[in-house]
Amino acid sequence: MSASNSDVPVSNFLRTIIENDLSANKFQNKRWAGRPGPLSVQQDAPRDSARIRTRFPPEPNGYLHIGHAKSICLNFGLARDYGGECHLRFDDTNPEKEEQAYVDSIIDTVKWLGFDWNYDGTEHLYFASDYFQFFYEFALALIESGDAYVDEQSPEQIRENRGTLTAPGVDSPWRNRPVEETLTLFREMRAGKHPNGSLCLRAKVDMKSPNINMRDPVIYRIRHEAHHRTGMDWPIYPMYTFAHPLEDALEMITHSICTLEFEDQRPFYDWVIDKLIALGHLPEQRPHQYEFARLNLNHVVTSKRRLKRLVDDHFVEGWDDPRMPTIMGLRRRGYTPEAIRLFCERIGVSKADSRIDYNILEQALRDDLDPKVDRAVAVLDPIRLIITNYPEGQSELCQAPKHPHNPEQGLREFPFSRELWIEREDFMENPPKKYFRLFPDNLVRLKYAYIVKCTGFKQDEDGNVIEVYAEYLPDTKSGTPGAASVKVKGTITWVSVPHADEVEVKLYDRLFTVENPDAGGQDFLEFINPDSVKTVTGFIEPGTTITPGARWQFERLGYFYVDGEAQDKTVINRSTTLRDNWV
Ligand code: ATP
Ligand code: MG
């Protein structure tokens, strides 16, 4: 793709490519045996009924984050929209850091996001480690054709001799080793006869290429290490740049979509596939790699390495801490799959790197939840309001719609009484202009109840207001004919002290104080926000069912979610405020 594609409207450039491919009938001779395999498996298979094939290829070395969601929505979304199929493929060619627990979590997360790799009864769930024998045979074929050699230089020597952007590389003294010798050594490597780092297999491409990735890249290394699926079967492991194009080719992928940093790898991607097509190991109908800009989200970090530091150094409580940009963290925070998909749709796909404001993510959640969730009242920074002319021990019910725009969701009822909790910020002794809430002698409406007039307040020894006093106007109850008889400028929310339920609520703020914690060459941890979570005790409207997974909009305060993962007690997380409060 040329750079001019950067100004093609969002989400369009890949669609344009696919639409052009489909209208040119580019895949009409493509076959698919119903399972991955080389030419020998695919050549007599029926025509592929999937119009395109894409894949999401995570490495099972960590948990998925919001950046992965972009790739998931893109790959599964394109397959869905164009009559194709998307594979979930674990790129598990690196034994050191990979684990079954990550595999399980990734499967669970992709499903939770609403995607599925079962098409007409075929599960397209694949593991690169299942292709180890194919990779090995392909490497043997490249050796036999004179396109690969075993190098005895140390990893440091290889790096030194690779050259730089301005200086060409230097040929390895082993570059022209006879084919038979390389074959013998490579078979010995496979048999486990050589220690880690002593030998490697390199593709014989071009040490003088202006693209450093083409200077005889290493394609196999020795690693005596247990793999989470193949155990000690393989003492050698293919490098990512060799394995990835082959995984795509074996799975008959049509559009291999990856992030921009792989653009310089594309020539080698093509080299590997073209060689193996020419050698009769892969079908002519080959995958093509396309690159898009990765998601960079402001006020968080998304690289697995950085997220791991946050966990290991206890800046957060775990990978699923509700402040983390991991999918499991967002899920605990109260994000819905619909909101994450909406976000991915809104940010689109382009060729140009950019940063996305965190508020775009929050707005997607608000837009998803607003029409769906019930409302409730909560007071999270409580102060007592006493209605001095309301009889002690008396109470009466007030009514409110569960949803202001969907009357069919019905009504909720909660009691009014002499003592109420109101928000501390809803009273001021000396208010500034345009403050329409409670202050001495002012009238306000208690939402869904009466108009009250502030008559006084009490302070503690330090001057903090601890109680506010008011008198109610008996004829002004909401929903009665007298409700409009007195005009007031302010409305405040409240809950009844003897009736409200006490709850623990966590209020979150941005995890980092700056938009890009990775900019400026400083350690990203220096920008961590020390106040990214605040735990408060609040009171909520009685009758609200607080079960794990429940969510509401608390009027004025935002969207809230009952954390199902919190240990031993009920914790309510604020998923997001009602509008962007970050200034
Ligand atoms: P990280 O950089 O966080 O370690 P990764 O790229 O190493 O991520 P993989 O498991 O290899 O993680 O990623 C699986 C897929 O997700 C890849 O195709 C990759 O391009 C894509 N992906 C990862 N991060 C992002 C991102 N921020 N935006 C879009 N796609 C991403
Ligand atoms: Mg990776």
Image (cartoon, rainbow, N blue to C red):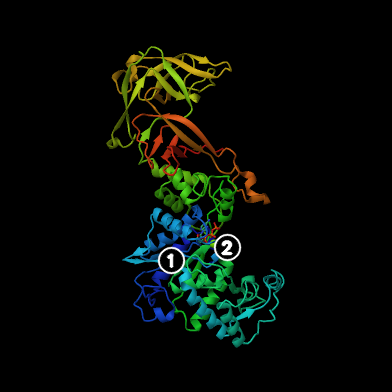
The quadrant of the rendering that contains the C terminus is top right
Residue 33 is labelled as: none
The residue lying toward the viewer, choosing from 296 and 17, is 296
Q: For the point 60% across and 82% down, which residue is it? A: 185
In the rendered image, which residue does mark 2 sit on?
Answer: 261
Total tally of numbered discs in the picture: 2
Cα separation, mark 2 vs mark 1, equals 19 Å
Q: For the point 45% across and 39% down, which residue is it? A: 573
Circle 2 packing at 10 Å, graded few (<14), some (14-19), many (20+), is: few
Give the answer, above or below, for where 430 lies relative to 538.
above
Q: Is mark 2 on a helix, strand or loop?
A: helix
> How far across and how far down the image is residue 152, in percent?
67, 78
> How far across and how far down the image is residue 31, in percent?
38, 76
> How far across and how far down the image is residue 298, in percent?
56, 47
In the rendered image, which residue does mark 1 sit on?
Answer: 54
- Give the amino acid at mark 2: Glu
Mark with earlier residue (2, 1): 1
Give the answer, above or below, for where 361 lies relative to 474.
below
The residue lying toward the viewer, choosing from 339 and 199, is 199
- Give the amino acid at mark 1: Thr
